[in-house]
Amino acid sequence: MRYRSLILALAAIIGFSAPACAGDRRLDNLFDQLRTAPSDGAADAVETEIWTIWLDHPGREVLTLMRQGVELLQADALDEALDCFDRVVEADPAYAEGWNKRANTHYLRGEYDEAVADIRRTLSLEPRHFAALAGLGLVYVAIGQPQGAIRAFEAALAINPHLSSIRDQVSQLRRQTAGVPM
């Protein structure tokens, strides 16, 4: 499943550092820089800074659980990863990235309703979470709703226009829905 590698790549970014949250003021400037970056390469550094802020948490236990969960997710130990992320969102229901990682895990387990619920929670805490929107698009692809996928992917691209794999997905889905052979 090629979407599995995209989700795992999104989940693999581990840049834990100083305490921050989705409402961190640094994000406003970073999102402006991301939208106006002159190239995908230039956007990569900005995206990394955003991920560093999103992944950060002031609680050592939450950070430890996140690291363990991501490692388990990468190792395809989905039940154990889900347990870690369940514990993360229980420990801090306001931590958007905990919900996003749990959504990734639900998606990989084929639990699409649960993934969507966690994506919605992520977006309620961080409406600019382009990876959560991309994940929503992947759920729509998985359940055979290409128009929903296009809308979710375009919403992600409106925030981060440098997601080349998502741009490719939109093009492919547009051809598919127009009846053009892939």
Image: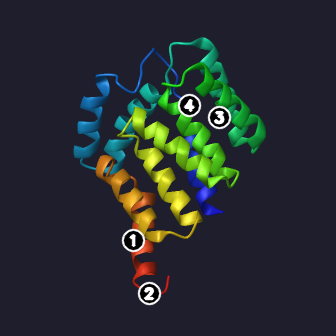
Q: Mark 3 points at which residue?
A: 70
- Alpha-carbon neighbours of circle 3 within 10 Å: few (<14), some, or many (≥20)? many
Residue 143: x and y, percent? 58, 65
- Alpha-carbon neighbours of circle 4 within 10 Å: few (<14), some, or many (≥20)? many
Q: Give the spatial CA distance, label 4 vs label 3.
A: 10 Å
Q: In which quarter of the image is residue 177?
A: bottom left
Q: Quick one: quadrant of the N terminus?
A: bottom right
Q: Mark 1 or 4 closer to N-term?
A: 4
Q: Give the spatial CA distance, label 1 vs label 3.
A: 30 Å
Number of the front mark, 3 or 2 = 2
Q: Name the residue under label 2.
A: 179
Tell me the kind of residue under disc 1.
Answer: Ser
- Alpha-carbon neighbours of circle 2 within 10 Å: few (<14), some, or many (≥20)? few
Q: Mark 1 points at which residue?
A: 171
Question: Please, what secondary structure does the residue beneath circle 1 have?
Answer: helix
Question: Please, what secondary structure does the residue beneath circle 2 have?
Answer: loop
The reply to whether residue 13 is in sight is no
